Image (cartoon, helix red, strand yellow):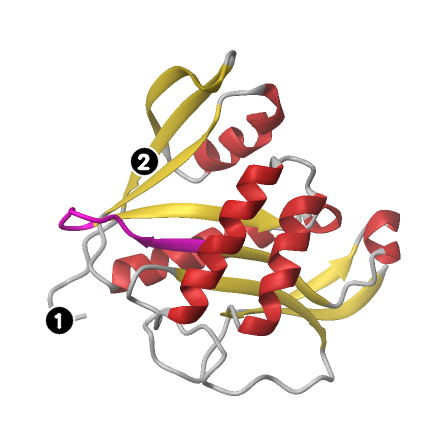
Amino acid sequence: MQKGWRMILRHLQARDAERAVELAHATQVFRPVELAVLREVLDDYMQAPEGQGYYALVAELLPWQEPLLSGAELAAPDNSEGSCEVADLSVGTGEAKAASPLGVVGFVIFGPTPLTAHAWDLYWIVVARPYQRWGIGSRLLEAAEIRIRAQRGEIVRVETSGSPTYAATRRFYAKHGYQQAGVIPDFYAPGDDLVIYFKRLPIPPANE
């Protein structure tokens, strides 16, 4: 088993936008209209400073010997610069080995919900197929929640599909403490329901 890769979580940069769309497309889950929306969201994120609508982080695999990025790019959960999440990952399957485990392999996009005091929406969380079940999605979700909590967010809302294609997605959220809040039948299309999940985050002490 090949070892020696590390994962960093950092802010999504302009150079990552096309890669993010490629990752979403490669999952074979999202419709063309959804990919078009993702492009629009990424454009909005690039044009507005972080904190004015969207936050976005990427998970990137690098060899251990490659130097870390600058502090301005690394994703510190408390909004400070100069720290990142690092994990020692192994290339555990033939599919992953063939994929050449370098570069951006996942991303998460989230932001405050308009017209609410402390609610946030998790808009996208995507991990490349060869790297699913490595815990990368969990690390991205955890990083998003830490960042939301640092911004005094208390509730995270997620909307997803009720179709069989999204069964693993629904299990993922349930596994991480998200409760199903409701279902709107046939919301996306006949037989394709909207499923709404939410999670209450611990309220940080006032001195944090």
Q: Is residue 137 above or below residue 165?
A: below
Could you tell me residue 199's position as x and y percent? 31, 39
Could you tell me residue 134's position as x and y percent? 66, 50
Q: Is residue 112 magenta?
A: yes
Residues packed near mark 2 inside 10 Å, few (<14), some (14 to 19) or many (20 plus)? many
Which quadrant of the rendered structure holds the N terminus? bottom right
Could you tell me residue 48's position as x and y percent? 35, 69
Asked which secondary structure carries label 1, the reply is loop
What type of secondary structure mainly makes up the magenta span?
A: loop
Quadrant in which residue 168 is drawn: top right
Q: Is residue 105 visible?
A: no
Residue span colored magenta: 109-118
Asked which secondary structure carries label 2, the reply is strand
Q: Which mark is residue 198?
A: 2
Residues packed near mark 1 inside 10 Å, few (<14), some (14 to 19) or many (20 plus)? few
Q: CA distance from mark 2 to mark 1?
A: 26 Å
x 60%, y 20%: residue: 164
x 25%, y 48%: residue: 113
x 34%, y 80%: residue: 80
Could you tell me residue 95's position as x and y percent? 85, 48
Horizontal side, residue 65 vs residue 16: left or right? right
Horizontal side, residue 17 vs residue 173: left or right? right
Amino acid type, residue under disc 1 in the picture: Asn
Q: Is residue 83 magenta?
A: no
* Nearer the observer, 98 or 27: 27
* Nearer the observer, 205 or 145: 145
Q: Which mark is residue 6?
A: none
x 83%, y 56%: residue: 99
Residue beneath disc 1: 207
